[in-house]
Image (tube, grey):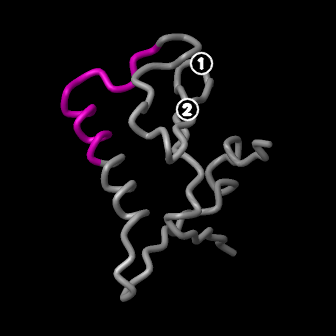
Amino acid sequence: METRLVFDLKDILGVRFLCQKCGAGNIAPPGNWENIPQACSHCREQWFADAIQNQLMERFRKALEELRKTNNGKVKILLEVADPRSWGGSILRRLD
């Protein structure tokens, strides 16, 4: 049986960046998305090395920010993701 998670854009607490080199993570909360990390704070691995990647991350940030603010009353945008346990589950943990 497949489990999926569905959530509203306003439910997003932040965007988590997980370093593939050392496993350390950074989170950019909604009010601080201007400061998307460019490198790992632990091992200093550069995550977005070229201008195209930086532009894509900036567009992603702006689009998500604007979509969270916008409500035309006609449609509700929900994201649907696979249950993280289906791909390892190491990221699914309580963060408080």
Say which quadrant the C terminus sits in: top right
The residue that disc 1 covers is 22
Quadrant position of residue 57: top left
Q: Which of the numbered marks, if any, corresponds to residue 37?
A: none
Q: Residue at x 39, y 76 (%)?
A: 71
Q: Determine crowd level at label 1: few under 14, some 14-19, many 20+ residues with C-alpha closer than 10 A.
A: few
Indicate yes or no whether the magenta region holds residue 3.
Answer: no
Q: Residue at x 55, y 40 (%)?
A: 16
Q: Residue at x 57, y 30 (%)?
A: 26
Give the answer, above or below, for where 1 lies relative to 68: below
Under mark 2, the amino acid is: Leu
Question: Between 51 and 9, which is closer to the camera in this rendering?
Answer: 9
93 relative position to 34: left or right: right
Give the answer, above or below, for where 8 lies relative to 25: below
Indicate yes or no whether the magenta region holds residue 46.
Answer: yes
- Prevailing secondary structure class for the magenta stretch in the rendered image: helix
The residue that disc 2 covers is 18
> Residue 68 at what x, y percent from top left?
43, 63
